[in-house]
Image (cartoon, grey):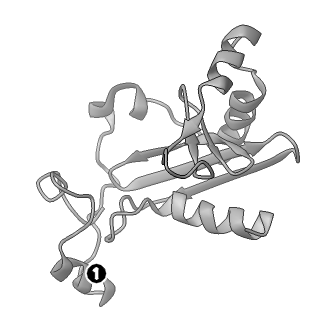
Amino acid sequence: MFMDNVLTIASTKLPADLIAAAEAGELEPNDVTDASSSWCWAAGQGTSTAGDLAVWGKALAEGGVLGKEMQKIRMDSLRPADPDNPDSAQYGLAIAKFGELYGHTGELPGFNSFMGYDPGNDLTLVVWTNLAPAADGRDPATSIARALIGELYGG
């Protein structure tokens, strides 16, 4: 995490001078190793492994979490994140679709994750990073996942 809440009021992207310093290696991210995530309620109360996230992602996509009727409502809720681009990532009731993968992202200061499951290919992708957001405001795990999805699916 390169910034604090004051710098992120208007944008998650650092000001140009700080981006240049980060790119030059002159600005190090803040160390949040010992920070308590208790302030974020349920979002910070779970501890899991990459294997746990793989199991959870598959359950989200295949209906292992909800009953059949509610799972149908959840999957039918998916809409393009960019209404002007029907091929963009989709988001619905606590589930997203990135290409063929269904899943979710997560973020706390200093940590970022992506999990996705493709039921058609029985493929699971989990990405964890220990930086969020990056100096340019992007989510590192999502950026890495996007590149991996492009490689996996030839996009």
Up-down relation of residue 56 to residue 6 (above or below): above
- Residue 129 rendering spot, x and y as whole percentages: 50, 60
Lateral position of residue 59 relative to residue 137, left or right:
right
* Residue plotted at (29% across, 90% down): 24
**Hey, which residue is sitting farthest front in the picture?**
84
- Residue 123 rendering spot, x and y as whole percentages: 82, 49
**Hey, which residue is sitting farthest right in the picture?**
121
Q: Nearer the viewer, residue 43 or 85?
A: 85
Regarding mark 1 in the picture, which secondary structure is present there? helix
Residue receiving disc 1:
22
Lateral position of residue 78 relative to residue 68, left or right:
left
* Residue plotted at (23% across, 85% down): 21
Q: Image quadrant for the N terminus?
A: bottom left
Q: How many residues crowd mark 1 within 10 Å: few (<14), some (14–19), many (20+)?
A: some
Up-down relation of residue 19 to residue 67 (above or below): below
Give the number of marks: 1
Q: Nearer the viewer, residue 33 or 132?
A: 132
Q: Image quadrant for the C terminus?
A: bottom right
Amino acid type indicated by mark 1:
Ala
- Residue 13 rendering spot, x and y as whole percentages: 27, 65
Q: Quadrant of residue 144?
A: bottom right
Q: Quadrant of residue 104?
A: top right
